[in-house]
Every structure is written in C-alpha cells, then in structure tokens.
Amino acid sequence: MRPLFLLFGFLFANIQGFTAEQIYFKIAVNDNLYSTFISNRVTLGKSPLDILATRMRDEHFNIADVETDYYDVKSAALTYDGRSVMQYDMKPKNGDRFRQVLIVDSDDGSVVHKDVYDNSGKLVFSFTSLEKPDHDEKPAVKETKQITDLNRCIKGFCVVGTRVMKDGTKHVMLSDGLNTFSVFEKKVSADISQSRKIVYGNYVMRKKVGNALYTVVGTVPFSEMELIIDNYASLEEKK
C-alpha cells in the first residue's frame, strides 16, 4: 500500500477541477502489466487506480510553461477528429527526464491526447479524450502553478510545492513544466533495502541515506532519482 499512499501524496499538488468527458487511459501498473480503462469525473465509487489516472491527466498545456532548454521539441499543426490541433513531441536532450507526445486543441489549449515514454521507449502512461469540446462554451481557465522558490532548482526542475505530512514525512514537489517528480524524506531507524520499480505510471525509487529514507516518485529515470536523493542527503548533512 505504501507506493499507492505516496502517489496520492505526489498528486496532492496537481489536483484540478476536471471536466466530465470520458477519457481512455493506458497505464503501466508495474514493470510487466498495463491496465486500460475508460473514466470520467472522479467519484467516490471509483477504484484507487481510476482516481490516480484521472488526477494524472493534464487538462491544458502551453508550450511556454515548459523549460524547453532541456528538450528537443518538434511541433506540427494537424487536424485531429475534425478539429485543429498542435502536436508536440518533446524528447529530453540529455536523457534525464521522460519523452512526452501531446496533441493539444489549438482553440483552448485542452489536451486531447498524451503519451509518456521512459528512456527505454516503454510507454508508462497515456490518455485520450473521447469527446469533442464545445467551443461555444467559455473555456476553463488553467490554474497557474506558482514557483515557490526559484532558487531551489535542479537541472531545470524547480520547487512548485512543499508540505509536511502527518507522520512527519517531508514532501517536496518539483517540475520543469512538463515532467514532474516528488521527493519524500522520512526519518527511520530500521534497515531498508534500496528498491526501484514502476508503480501506476510513475518510476518509484526508495533509498536510505543515514537515518533518512528517501522516496522519489515521478517521470524521471532511476539514474536521476539516485542523483536527486544524494543531492538532498548532502543538503541535509550541511544543515
């Protein structure tokens, strides 16, 4: 249950008011298994996986929000299901984050389709909106994410949220405008083995350094997660 609990924490700062249209999801549940399903608005009757996938869905996208210094970006104007869209294929220049392909409605910026691939080319998360938006209605306004501390950035990932959970775990969320990850730090005394796995569309790495257990959850490769943990552990030692 712990990975699921951490993923709810990871998504805490990302929850928006989602529309009620039906969405097709394909998500890597673990290293070997995918789950595919159709979902809509989050309700109390839905499964944890259903809720997680729906909250991971991006409603809107603006290329101006992305740290494009870290991506090779290819874009093309297309027609998709009878509407004008922009397709963005964003590949990391240095292999330190995941490739994403998005199809975005040109009129209101709503995300019609999104694929997320790890550095081996494995699809870890995908969604497609199955309904056309009504452009006669006023488009929903995307909530702008405010950077809380521009001085706290690692290779283009800047802190977009921090909190302390009820059990004392520190949660720091970072984003480059496209890929996102969270760092959880908890003081522990027991010996805990290092682990790496795919859990519900995210990479998850756990490593103990000193008396602190670090867990990183998000769309960056394991090699970067280890560097992130070592960086945070080093900062803690200097305090």
Image (cartoon, helix red, strand yellow):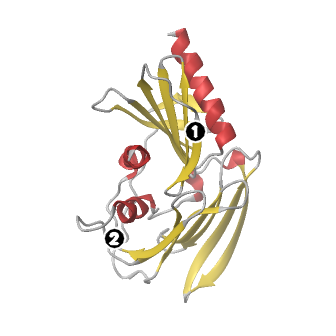
Q: Residue 8, how many percent across, how many down?
A: 37, 48
> Is 5 placed left or right of 60 in the picture?
left
Instruction: Report the residue at 38% width, 54% height from top.
Output: 143
Q: Amino acid at mark 1?
A: Ser
Q: Residue 34, how many percent across, how many down?
A: 54, 67
- Between the C-alphas of marks 2 and 1, the distance is 36 Å
Image position of 93 with respect to 47: above or below: above
Image position of 78 with respect to 53: above or below: below
Mark 2 or mark 1: name the one nearer the start of the chain.
2
Instruction: Report the residue at 32% width, 33% height from top.
Output: 165
Query: Which residue in the protein does label 1 denote?
Result: 195
Tag 2, which secondary structure? loop
Q: Residue 172, how many percent across, how many down?
A: 45, 34
Residue 146: quadrant of the picture: top left
Is 26 in front, or is 20?
26
Give the farthest residue toward the bottom. 82
Query: Which residue in the protein does label 2 denote?
Result: 19
